[in-house]
């Protein structure tokens, strides 16, 4: 078992990062010299007919440092999140529920097609069969979804409970050549009305002007041009603008959504952009990279296991920490991290390059904590344990630890440790060798737990 632990952690610690160049961004300009980090909650929300979208304040110092924005969608049963695309890559995680979703990649074929024996329908200028559309995927709890900048996508809840998805948009990615503001370009709906009616329902004094920008792209085009572009009459073209649509960005489908659904399957080898895997499930405990039966486990998704992440320059991790257990003090060498607590509560301490504790407090379910690159962090679960997911701003985020069997301290000569801390060789030995675990340590009050 110990050999398995060591091999798994070595893979996490030693893999070389792919080139992680990011465009000219705020964090590259020195705006990560922050003296205080906060555990954050949503700053505003938008109510829709079919659900709720909640947004964190992307202008806060923490999120500006990481160059990302964070939001959460709660989609009700038979709720359809309308098609949209974004100015930056998106990495999403399904917290709860199930559904179907599609990503439309320009130039790719319509691989899903209705049976040919169905009668054709007459349209202006020709005929078409019942329907053809691009690939659709099933969605379930534990799925990680990668979406490139500019790729339109939609989501539908066909389950019997709310579908909850948390999303990171990497605004500092070199795929985004605009500014650091997150933008959603809607292909349908009228989110402006929803925002006005909701008056943003601000949380904790968030300031006006900080909301996520979104709007229907057809509204700026004339009816005449639209009619010509789609070869339809102007009345039909006008409906594309959704000018009087008050349903919001998430709408209710009165009857079951009629699409050509795929069989349950696993993706094969990716050979082209059109066939690339866009979803990876991380929920199964058996796929954990690091596992300590007395303390917890860590599962990761990076460009080696999910090749599209090499293009997005993002990676993902899910951690489970048992009661009172500790995740070793550590730092990410090449990435910022956004930690979202999914269950329980943890005490977390974060230290900057000046040796200052920029955060020391409890973080509970539903809160987000940004940990900048190279800042040291330690986490200890409370009595009920703690689970979280991390969005990381590198295709292969690498971790270094301060204590444990593969730590920086363990790799130092004994006399270096003794002289560095002005301690005896016996004390230095205890510091170096007392912890035989790699990443997760059982606490003094921890007990075995099955998750």
Image (tube, helix red, strand yellow):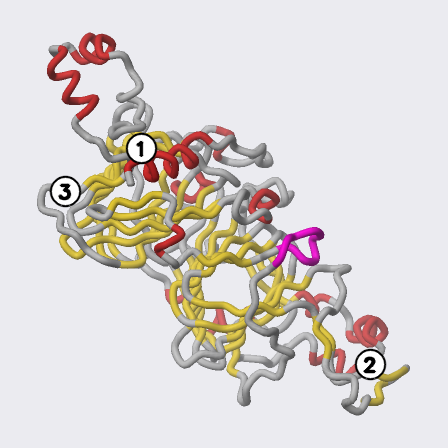
Residue at figure coordinates x 31%, y 28% from the top left: 406
Q: Which residues are magenta?
A: 268-276
Q: Which residue is mark 2?
A: 232
Asked if residue 420 lies in the magenta stretch, the reply is no
Q: From the viewer's perspective, is 98 left or right of 378? A: right
Residue at figure coordinates x 51%, y 30% from the top left: 16
First along the sequence among labels 1 and 3: 1
Instruction: Estimate how packed mark 2 is, as few (under 14), some (14 to 19) or many (20 or more) residues with alpha carbons within 10 Å.
Output: some
For discs 1 and 2, the disc positioned in front in the rendered view: 1
Residue 386 visible somewhere in the drawing: yes
Q: From the viewer's perspective, is 357 left or right of 232? A: left
Q: Which residue is mark 3?
A: 443
Q: From the viewer's perspective, is 87 left or right of 93? A: right
First along the sequence among labels 1 and 2: 2
The foreground one among 18 and 15 is: 15
Instruction: Estimate how packed mark 1 is, as few (under 14), some (14 to 19) or many (20 or more) residues with alpha carbons within 10 Å.
Output: many
SS at mark 1 in the image: strand
SS at mark 3 in the image: loop
* Residues marked 1 and 3 touching at CB (< 8 Å): no
Q: Position of residue 34 (x, y in %)?
A: 35, 33
Number of labels in the image equals 3
């Amino acid at each position: 078992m110990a050999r398995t632990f060591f091999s798994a952690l070595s893979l996490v610690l030693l893999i070389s990062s792919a080139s992680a160049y990011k465009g000219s961004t705020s964090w590259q300009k020195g705006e990560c010299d922050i003296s205080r980090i906060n555990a954050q909650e949503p700053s505003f929300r938008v109510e829709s007919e079919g659900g709720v979208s909640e947004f964190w304040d992307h202008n806060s110092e923490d999120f500006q440092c990481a160059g990302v924005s964070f939001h959460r969608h709660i989609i009700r049963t038979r709720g359809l999140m309308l098609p949209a695309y974004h100015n930056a890559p998106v990495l999403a995680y399904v917290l709860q529920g199930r559904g179907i979703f599609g990503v439309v990649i320009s130039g790719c074929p319509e691989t899903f097609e209705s049976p040919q024996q169905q009668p054709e329908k007459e349209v202006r200028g020709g005929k078409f069969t019942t329907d053809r559309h691009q690939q659709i995927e099933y969605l379930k709890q534990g799925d990680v979804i990668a979406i490139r900048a500019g790729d339109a996508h939609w989501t539908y809840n066909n389950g019997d409970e709310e579908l909850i998805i948390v999303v990171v948009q990497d605004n500092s990615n070199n795929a985004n050549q605009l500014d650091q503001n997150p933008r959603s370009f809607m292909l349908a709906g009228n989110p402006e009305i929803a925002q006005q009616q909701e008056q943003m329902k601000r949380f904790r004094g968030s300031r006006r002007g900080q909301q996520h920008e979104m709007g229907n792209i057809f509204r700026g085009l004339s009816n005449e041009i639209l009619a010509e572009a789609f070869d339809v009459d102007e009345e039909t073209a006008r409906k594309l603008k959704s000018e009087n649509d008050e349903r919001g960005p998430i709408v209710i489908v009165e009857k079951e959504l009629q699409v050509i659904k795929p069989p349950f399957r696993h993706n094969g080898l990716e050979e082209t952009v059109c066939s690339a895997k866009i979803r990876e499930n991380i929920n199964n405990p058996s796929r954990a990279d690091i596992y300590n039966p007395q303390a917890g486990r860590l599962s990761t998704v990076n460009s080696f296991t999910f090749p599209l992440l090499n293009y997005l320059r993002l990676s993902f991790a899910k951690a489970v920490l048992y009661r009172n257990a500790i995740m070793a003090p550590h730092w990410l060498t090449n990435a910022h991290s956004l930690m979202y607590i999914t269950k329980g509560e943890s005490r977390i301490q974060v230290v900057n390059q000046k040796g200052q504790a920029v955060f020391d407090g409890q973080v509970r379910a539903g809160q987000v904590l940004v940990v900048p690159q190279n800042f040291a962090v330690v986490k200890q679960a409370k009595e009920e344990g703690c689970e979280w997911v991390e969005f990381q701003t590198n295709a292969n985020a690498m971790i270094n630890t301060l204590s444990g069997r593969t730590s920086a301290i363990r790799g130092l000569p004994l006399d270096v440790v003794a002289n560095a801390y002005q301690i005896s060789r016996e004390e230095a030995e205890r510091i170096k060798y007392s912890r035989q675990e790699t990443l997760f340590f059982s606490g003094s009050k921890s007990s075995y737990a099955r998750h």
